[in-house]
Amino acid sequence: MALDFFDCNCCIGRSAVTNPGSFYATDELVSRMSDYGIGRALIYHTIARDHSPAEGNLLLSDITRDNPSLIPVWVVMPHHTGEFPAPDELEGQMRKNSVKAARIFPSAGRHNFSIKPYSAGSLLEMLAQNRIPLFIDIYETGWESIDMLLAAYRDLPVVLCNTGYRGDRYIYPLMETYGNVYLETSRYLSHLGIEALCKKEGSDRILFGSGMPVYTGAGAVFYISKLMLEDKDKQMIASGNLERLIGDIRL
């Protein structure tokens, strides 16, 4: 069975740190997606991650407007310092630009803010009310903060990215406790790891991700294609679960 792949974890643009073998051009990403059989991808801009979210998000909108296979993900942050729009204004901008997901980089090495209610509460409430999926690299927050986030915002779909295979002792109980937590696959690499997780928790909260351009999309596609699962489960992971999440957005 040929799977329809919808990548939930891509970025575009020059990075502050160059990774050997990676790339940054939009046409290169689209070309590689075609080569690997990835039909669509959620993408964010490296400028939004490494420098200014507001500036990078606007650059991303210019890119995705002419590339229907690329769906914009905006990097967001609290508005208190005036560097970023307040949640009500941000909501309108995201609607206008057909944004389908959000991403945060709150660590001290990135945007340096707290995800506790006093800082990010109004932002997270807006995302939750609109059921906009929020993508987070686990090393940006740590596991205990993820627990707090999931408990406080039960309507907010939270997608854990770059977890690594050693995260199981957190992933399993989080999935048992919270119905709004999802797992991205690009770095969740262990022998029969996804199969075991599906057996325990089901396949409906696992999302295909490649990690391009830092990692190869070829290996990511091959990994999902060769899972020892039923075809319907593999298709849910490849694209079905992400399509369902996006379909639930209320913007």
Image (cartoon, rainbow, N blue to C red):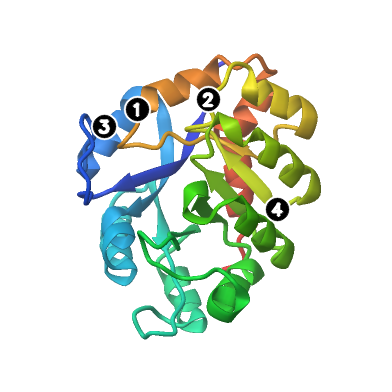
Q: Secondary structure at mark 2?
A: loop
Q: CA distance from mark 2 to mark 4?
A: 22 Å
| Tag 3–tag 2 contact (CB < 8 Å) | no
Question: Would residue 178 be found to the left or right of residue 185 on screen?
Answer: right
- Residue type at mark 3 is Ser
Q: Secondary structure at mark 1?
A: loop
What label does residue 189 carry, if any? 2
Give the crowd class for mark 2: few <14, some 14-19, many >=20 residues within 10 Å: some
Q: How many marks?
A: 4
Q: CA distance from mark 1 to mark 2?
A: 13 Å
In the displayed structure, 39 sits above or below 36; it is below
Among the two numbered marks 3 and 1 on one chain, the one whose residue lies closer to the N terminus: 3
For residue 126, what is the image quadrant?
A: bottom right
Q: CA distance from mark 3 to mark 4?
A: 33 Å
- Residue type at mark 4 is Asn
Give the crowd class for mark 4: few <14, some 14-19, many >=20 residues within 10 Å: some
In the displayed structure, 117 sits above or below 205; it is below
Instruction: Please give the residue where the numbered disc 3 appears in the rendered image.
Output: 31
Nearer the camera: disc 2 or disc 4: 2
Among the two numbered marks 3 and 4 on one chain, the one whose residue lies closer to the N terminus: 3
- Residue type at mark 2 is Leu
Instruction: Please give the residue where the numbered disc 4 appears in the rendered image.
Output: 180
Q: CA distance from mark 3 to mark 2?
A: 25 Å
Q: What's the residue at 59%, 16% (across, down)?
A: 191
Instruction: Please give the residue where the numbered disc 1 appears in the rendered image.
Output: 216
Among the two numbered marks 1 and 2 on one chain, the one whose residue lies closer to the N terminus: 2
- Residue type at mark 1 is Thr
Among the two numbered marks 3 and 2 on one chain, the one whose residue lies closer to the N terminus: 3
